[in-house]
């Protein structure tokens, strides 16, 4: 639009951007070309755990932690990085893991019947 002699005011109205943005885009285009204008400069922070995520995921899938505290300890042991509870939960979510609350055994449950059921189910899967 600038090469077709359209005024900066008209460009700002058509593109719905400020006059300062138009000026900075034109300076970038003059100095670096179209590649400089189209370059993505968005800030995307990355976690220091990125190199360890696959290893941690395998470890947690093989032996799920019972609570957040043992999981934080395992992260510290495997990656050497100490996380807070909130950051560790975000990391679990990022790995695709979910918090599962264990169910309560009813008070009138027969432990012998449960043991037999568990053994029968385990043997039938093998």
Image (cartoon, rainbow, N blue to C red):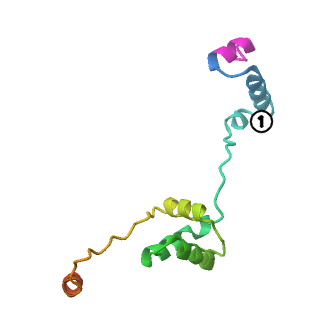
Viewer-proximal residue, 42 or 71?
A: 71
**Disc 1 designates what residue?**
32
Task: Indicate yes or no whether the magenta region holds residue 6.
Answer: yes
Residue at the image point whose x is 24% and y is 85% from the top: 111
- Residue 126 visible, this angle: no
Q: Residues within 10 Å of mark 1 (few under 14, many from 20)?
A: few
**Label 1 secondary element:** helix
The location of residue 123, given as percent across then percent down, is: 21, 86
Residue at the image point whose x is 20% and y is 83% from the top: 110
Q: Which range is magenta?
A: 1-13
The location of residue 81, given as percent across then percent down, is: 66, 72
Choose top left, top right, bottom left or bottom right for residue 22. top right
Above-or-below relation of 37 to 2: below
Task: Indicate yes or no whether the magenta region holds residue 24.
Answer: no
Choose top left, top right, bottom left or bottom right for residue 82. bottom right
Above-or-below relation of 105 to 47: below
Above-or-below relation of 88 to 111: above
Query: Which residue is farthest front?
Result: 107
Viewer-proximal residue, 121 or 29?
A: 121
The location of residue 48, given as percent across then percent down, is: 66, 64
Residue at the image point whose x is 81% and y is 33% from the top: 31
Choose top left, top right, bottom left or bottom right for residue 41. top right
The location of residue 1, given as percent across then percent down, is: 68, 17
């Amino acid at each position: 639009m600038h090469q077709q002699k359209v005024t900066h005011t008209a460009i700002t109205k058509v593109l719905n951007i400020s006059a300062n943005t138009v000026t900075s885009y034109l300076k970038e285009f003059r100095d670096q070309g179209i590649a400089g204008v189209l370059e993505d400069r968005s800030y995307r922070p990355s976690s220091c755990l990125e190199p360890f995520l696959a290893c941690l995921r395998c470890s947690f899938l093989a032996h799920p932690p019972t609570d957040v505290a043992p999981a934080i300890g395992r992260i510290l042991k495997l990656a050497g990085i100490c996380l807070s509870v909130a950051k560790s939960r975000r990391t679990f979510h990022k790995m695709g893991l979910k918090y599962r609350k264990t169910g309560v055994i009813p008070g009138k449950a027969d432990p012998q019947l449960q043991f037999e059921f568990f053994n029968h189910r385990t043997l039938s899967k093998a």
